[in-house]
Every structure is written in C-alpha cells, then in structure tokens.
Amino acid sequence: GGKVSVAASESGEWVRVEIRDTGIGLPSDDIPRIFERFYRVDKARSRELGGTGLGLAIVKHIIQGHNGRLQVESTPGKGSAFSLSIRSCP
C-alpha cells in the first residue's frame, strides 16, 4: 500500500538519482550494515520468501566503481530515501 517515487537531477558535473518510498523504513542501527553482502534487516525472512541480501551490496560496488556517492536516509514507520550520485558524461 506504499508508494515509490524516482527523481533525477543534474548539478554541475553530477547526476543524482533519488528513490523514495513510504514503506516501513529501516531501524537506525541497521543502516550502517545494509550495503554488506548477505545482510538482511529482517532476520526472520528466509531466501524462499525473497531476497538474498545482495542487491544493495551490488549497487554499492557499481556506484563505487564509477567514483560515485551513495546515501540512505530512513525513518521507521515513514519510509526510506536512497540517493546515488555519479559524474555525468562529457
């Protein structure tokens, strides 16, 4: 029942993409670890229910490979915002 929005903008030589949702949000203690391989916020969730814990780790490595930046903000009960910034092509 939540919503997801995607926005992109350009500022100087940087392109920024932001993905926001109105989902359950992330506990602040988990945020530093969500980009680790195989890390799952919901420990009770099995692989059969979906997710391997690799998606955000892959995103992190792709962005780092392009010398970009990756940020996350989240409030439990209100949602999350992920933003990535990479240099635009000349």
Image: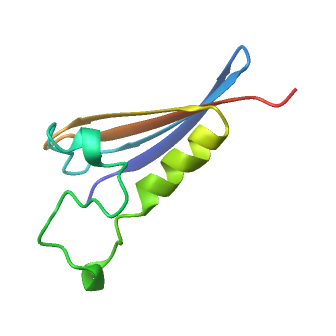
Question: Between residues 88 and 66, which one lies in front from this camera angle?
Answer: 66
Which is nearer the eye, 62 or 1? 62
54 shown above or below 16: below
Image quadrant containing the N terminus: bottom left
Tell me where residue 74 sits by quadrant: top left
Structure colour scheme: rainbow
Q: Is residue 33 above or below residue 57?
A: above
Q: In the displayed structure, would residue 41 be above or below residue 82? A: below
The quadrant of the image that shows the C terminus is top right
Q: Nearer the viewer, residue 18 or 89?
A: 89
Q: Is residue 14 left or right of residue 80?
A: right
**79 relative position to 51: left or right:** left
Horizontal side, residue 76 vs residue 80: left or right: left
Q: Quadrant of residue 55?
A: bottom left
Q: Residue furthest right?
A: 90
Residue at 36% in and 37% down: 81
Q: Residue at x 54, y 48 (%)?
A: 61
The residue at the point 37 percent across, 59 percent down is 37
Give the residue drawn at x 35%, y 52%: 36
Tell me where residue 13 appears, x and y as whole percent. 73, 18
Q: Is residue 18 left or right of residue 86?
A: left
Find the residue positioned furthest to the top: 12
What is the tally of numbered marks visible in this picture?
Answer: 0
Q: Position of residue 66 (x, y in %)?
A: 67, 38
Point out residue 56 in the picture as x, y percentages from the top left corner.
42, 53
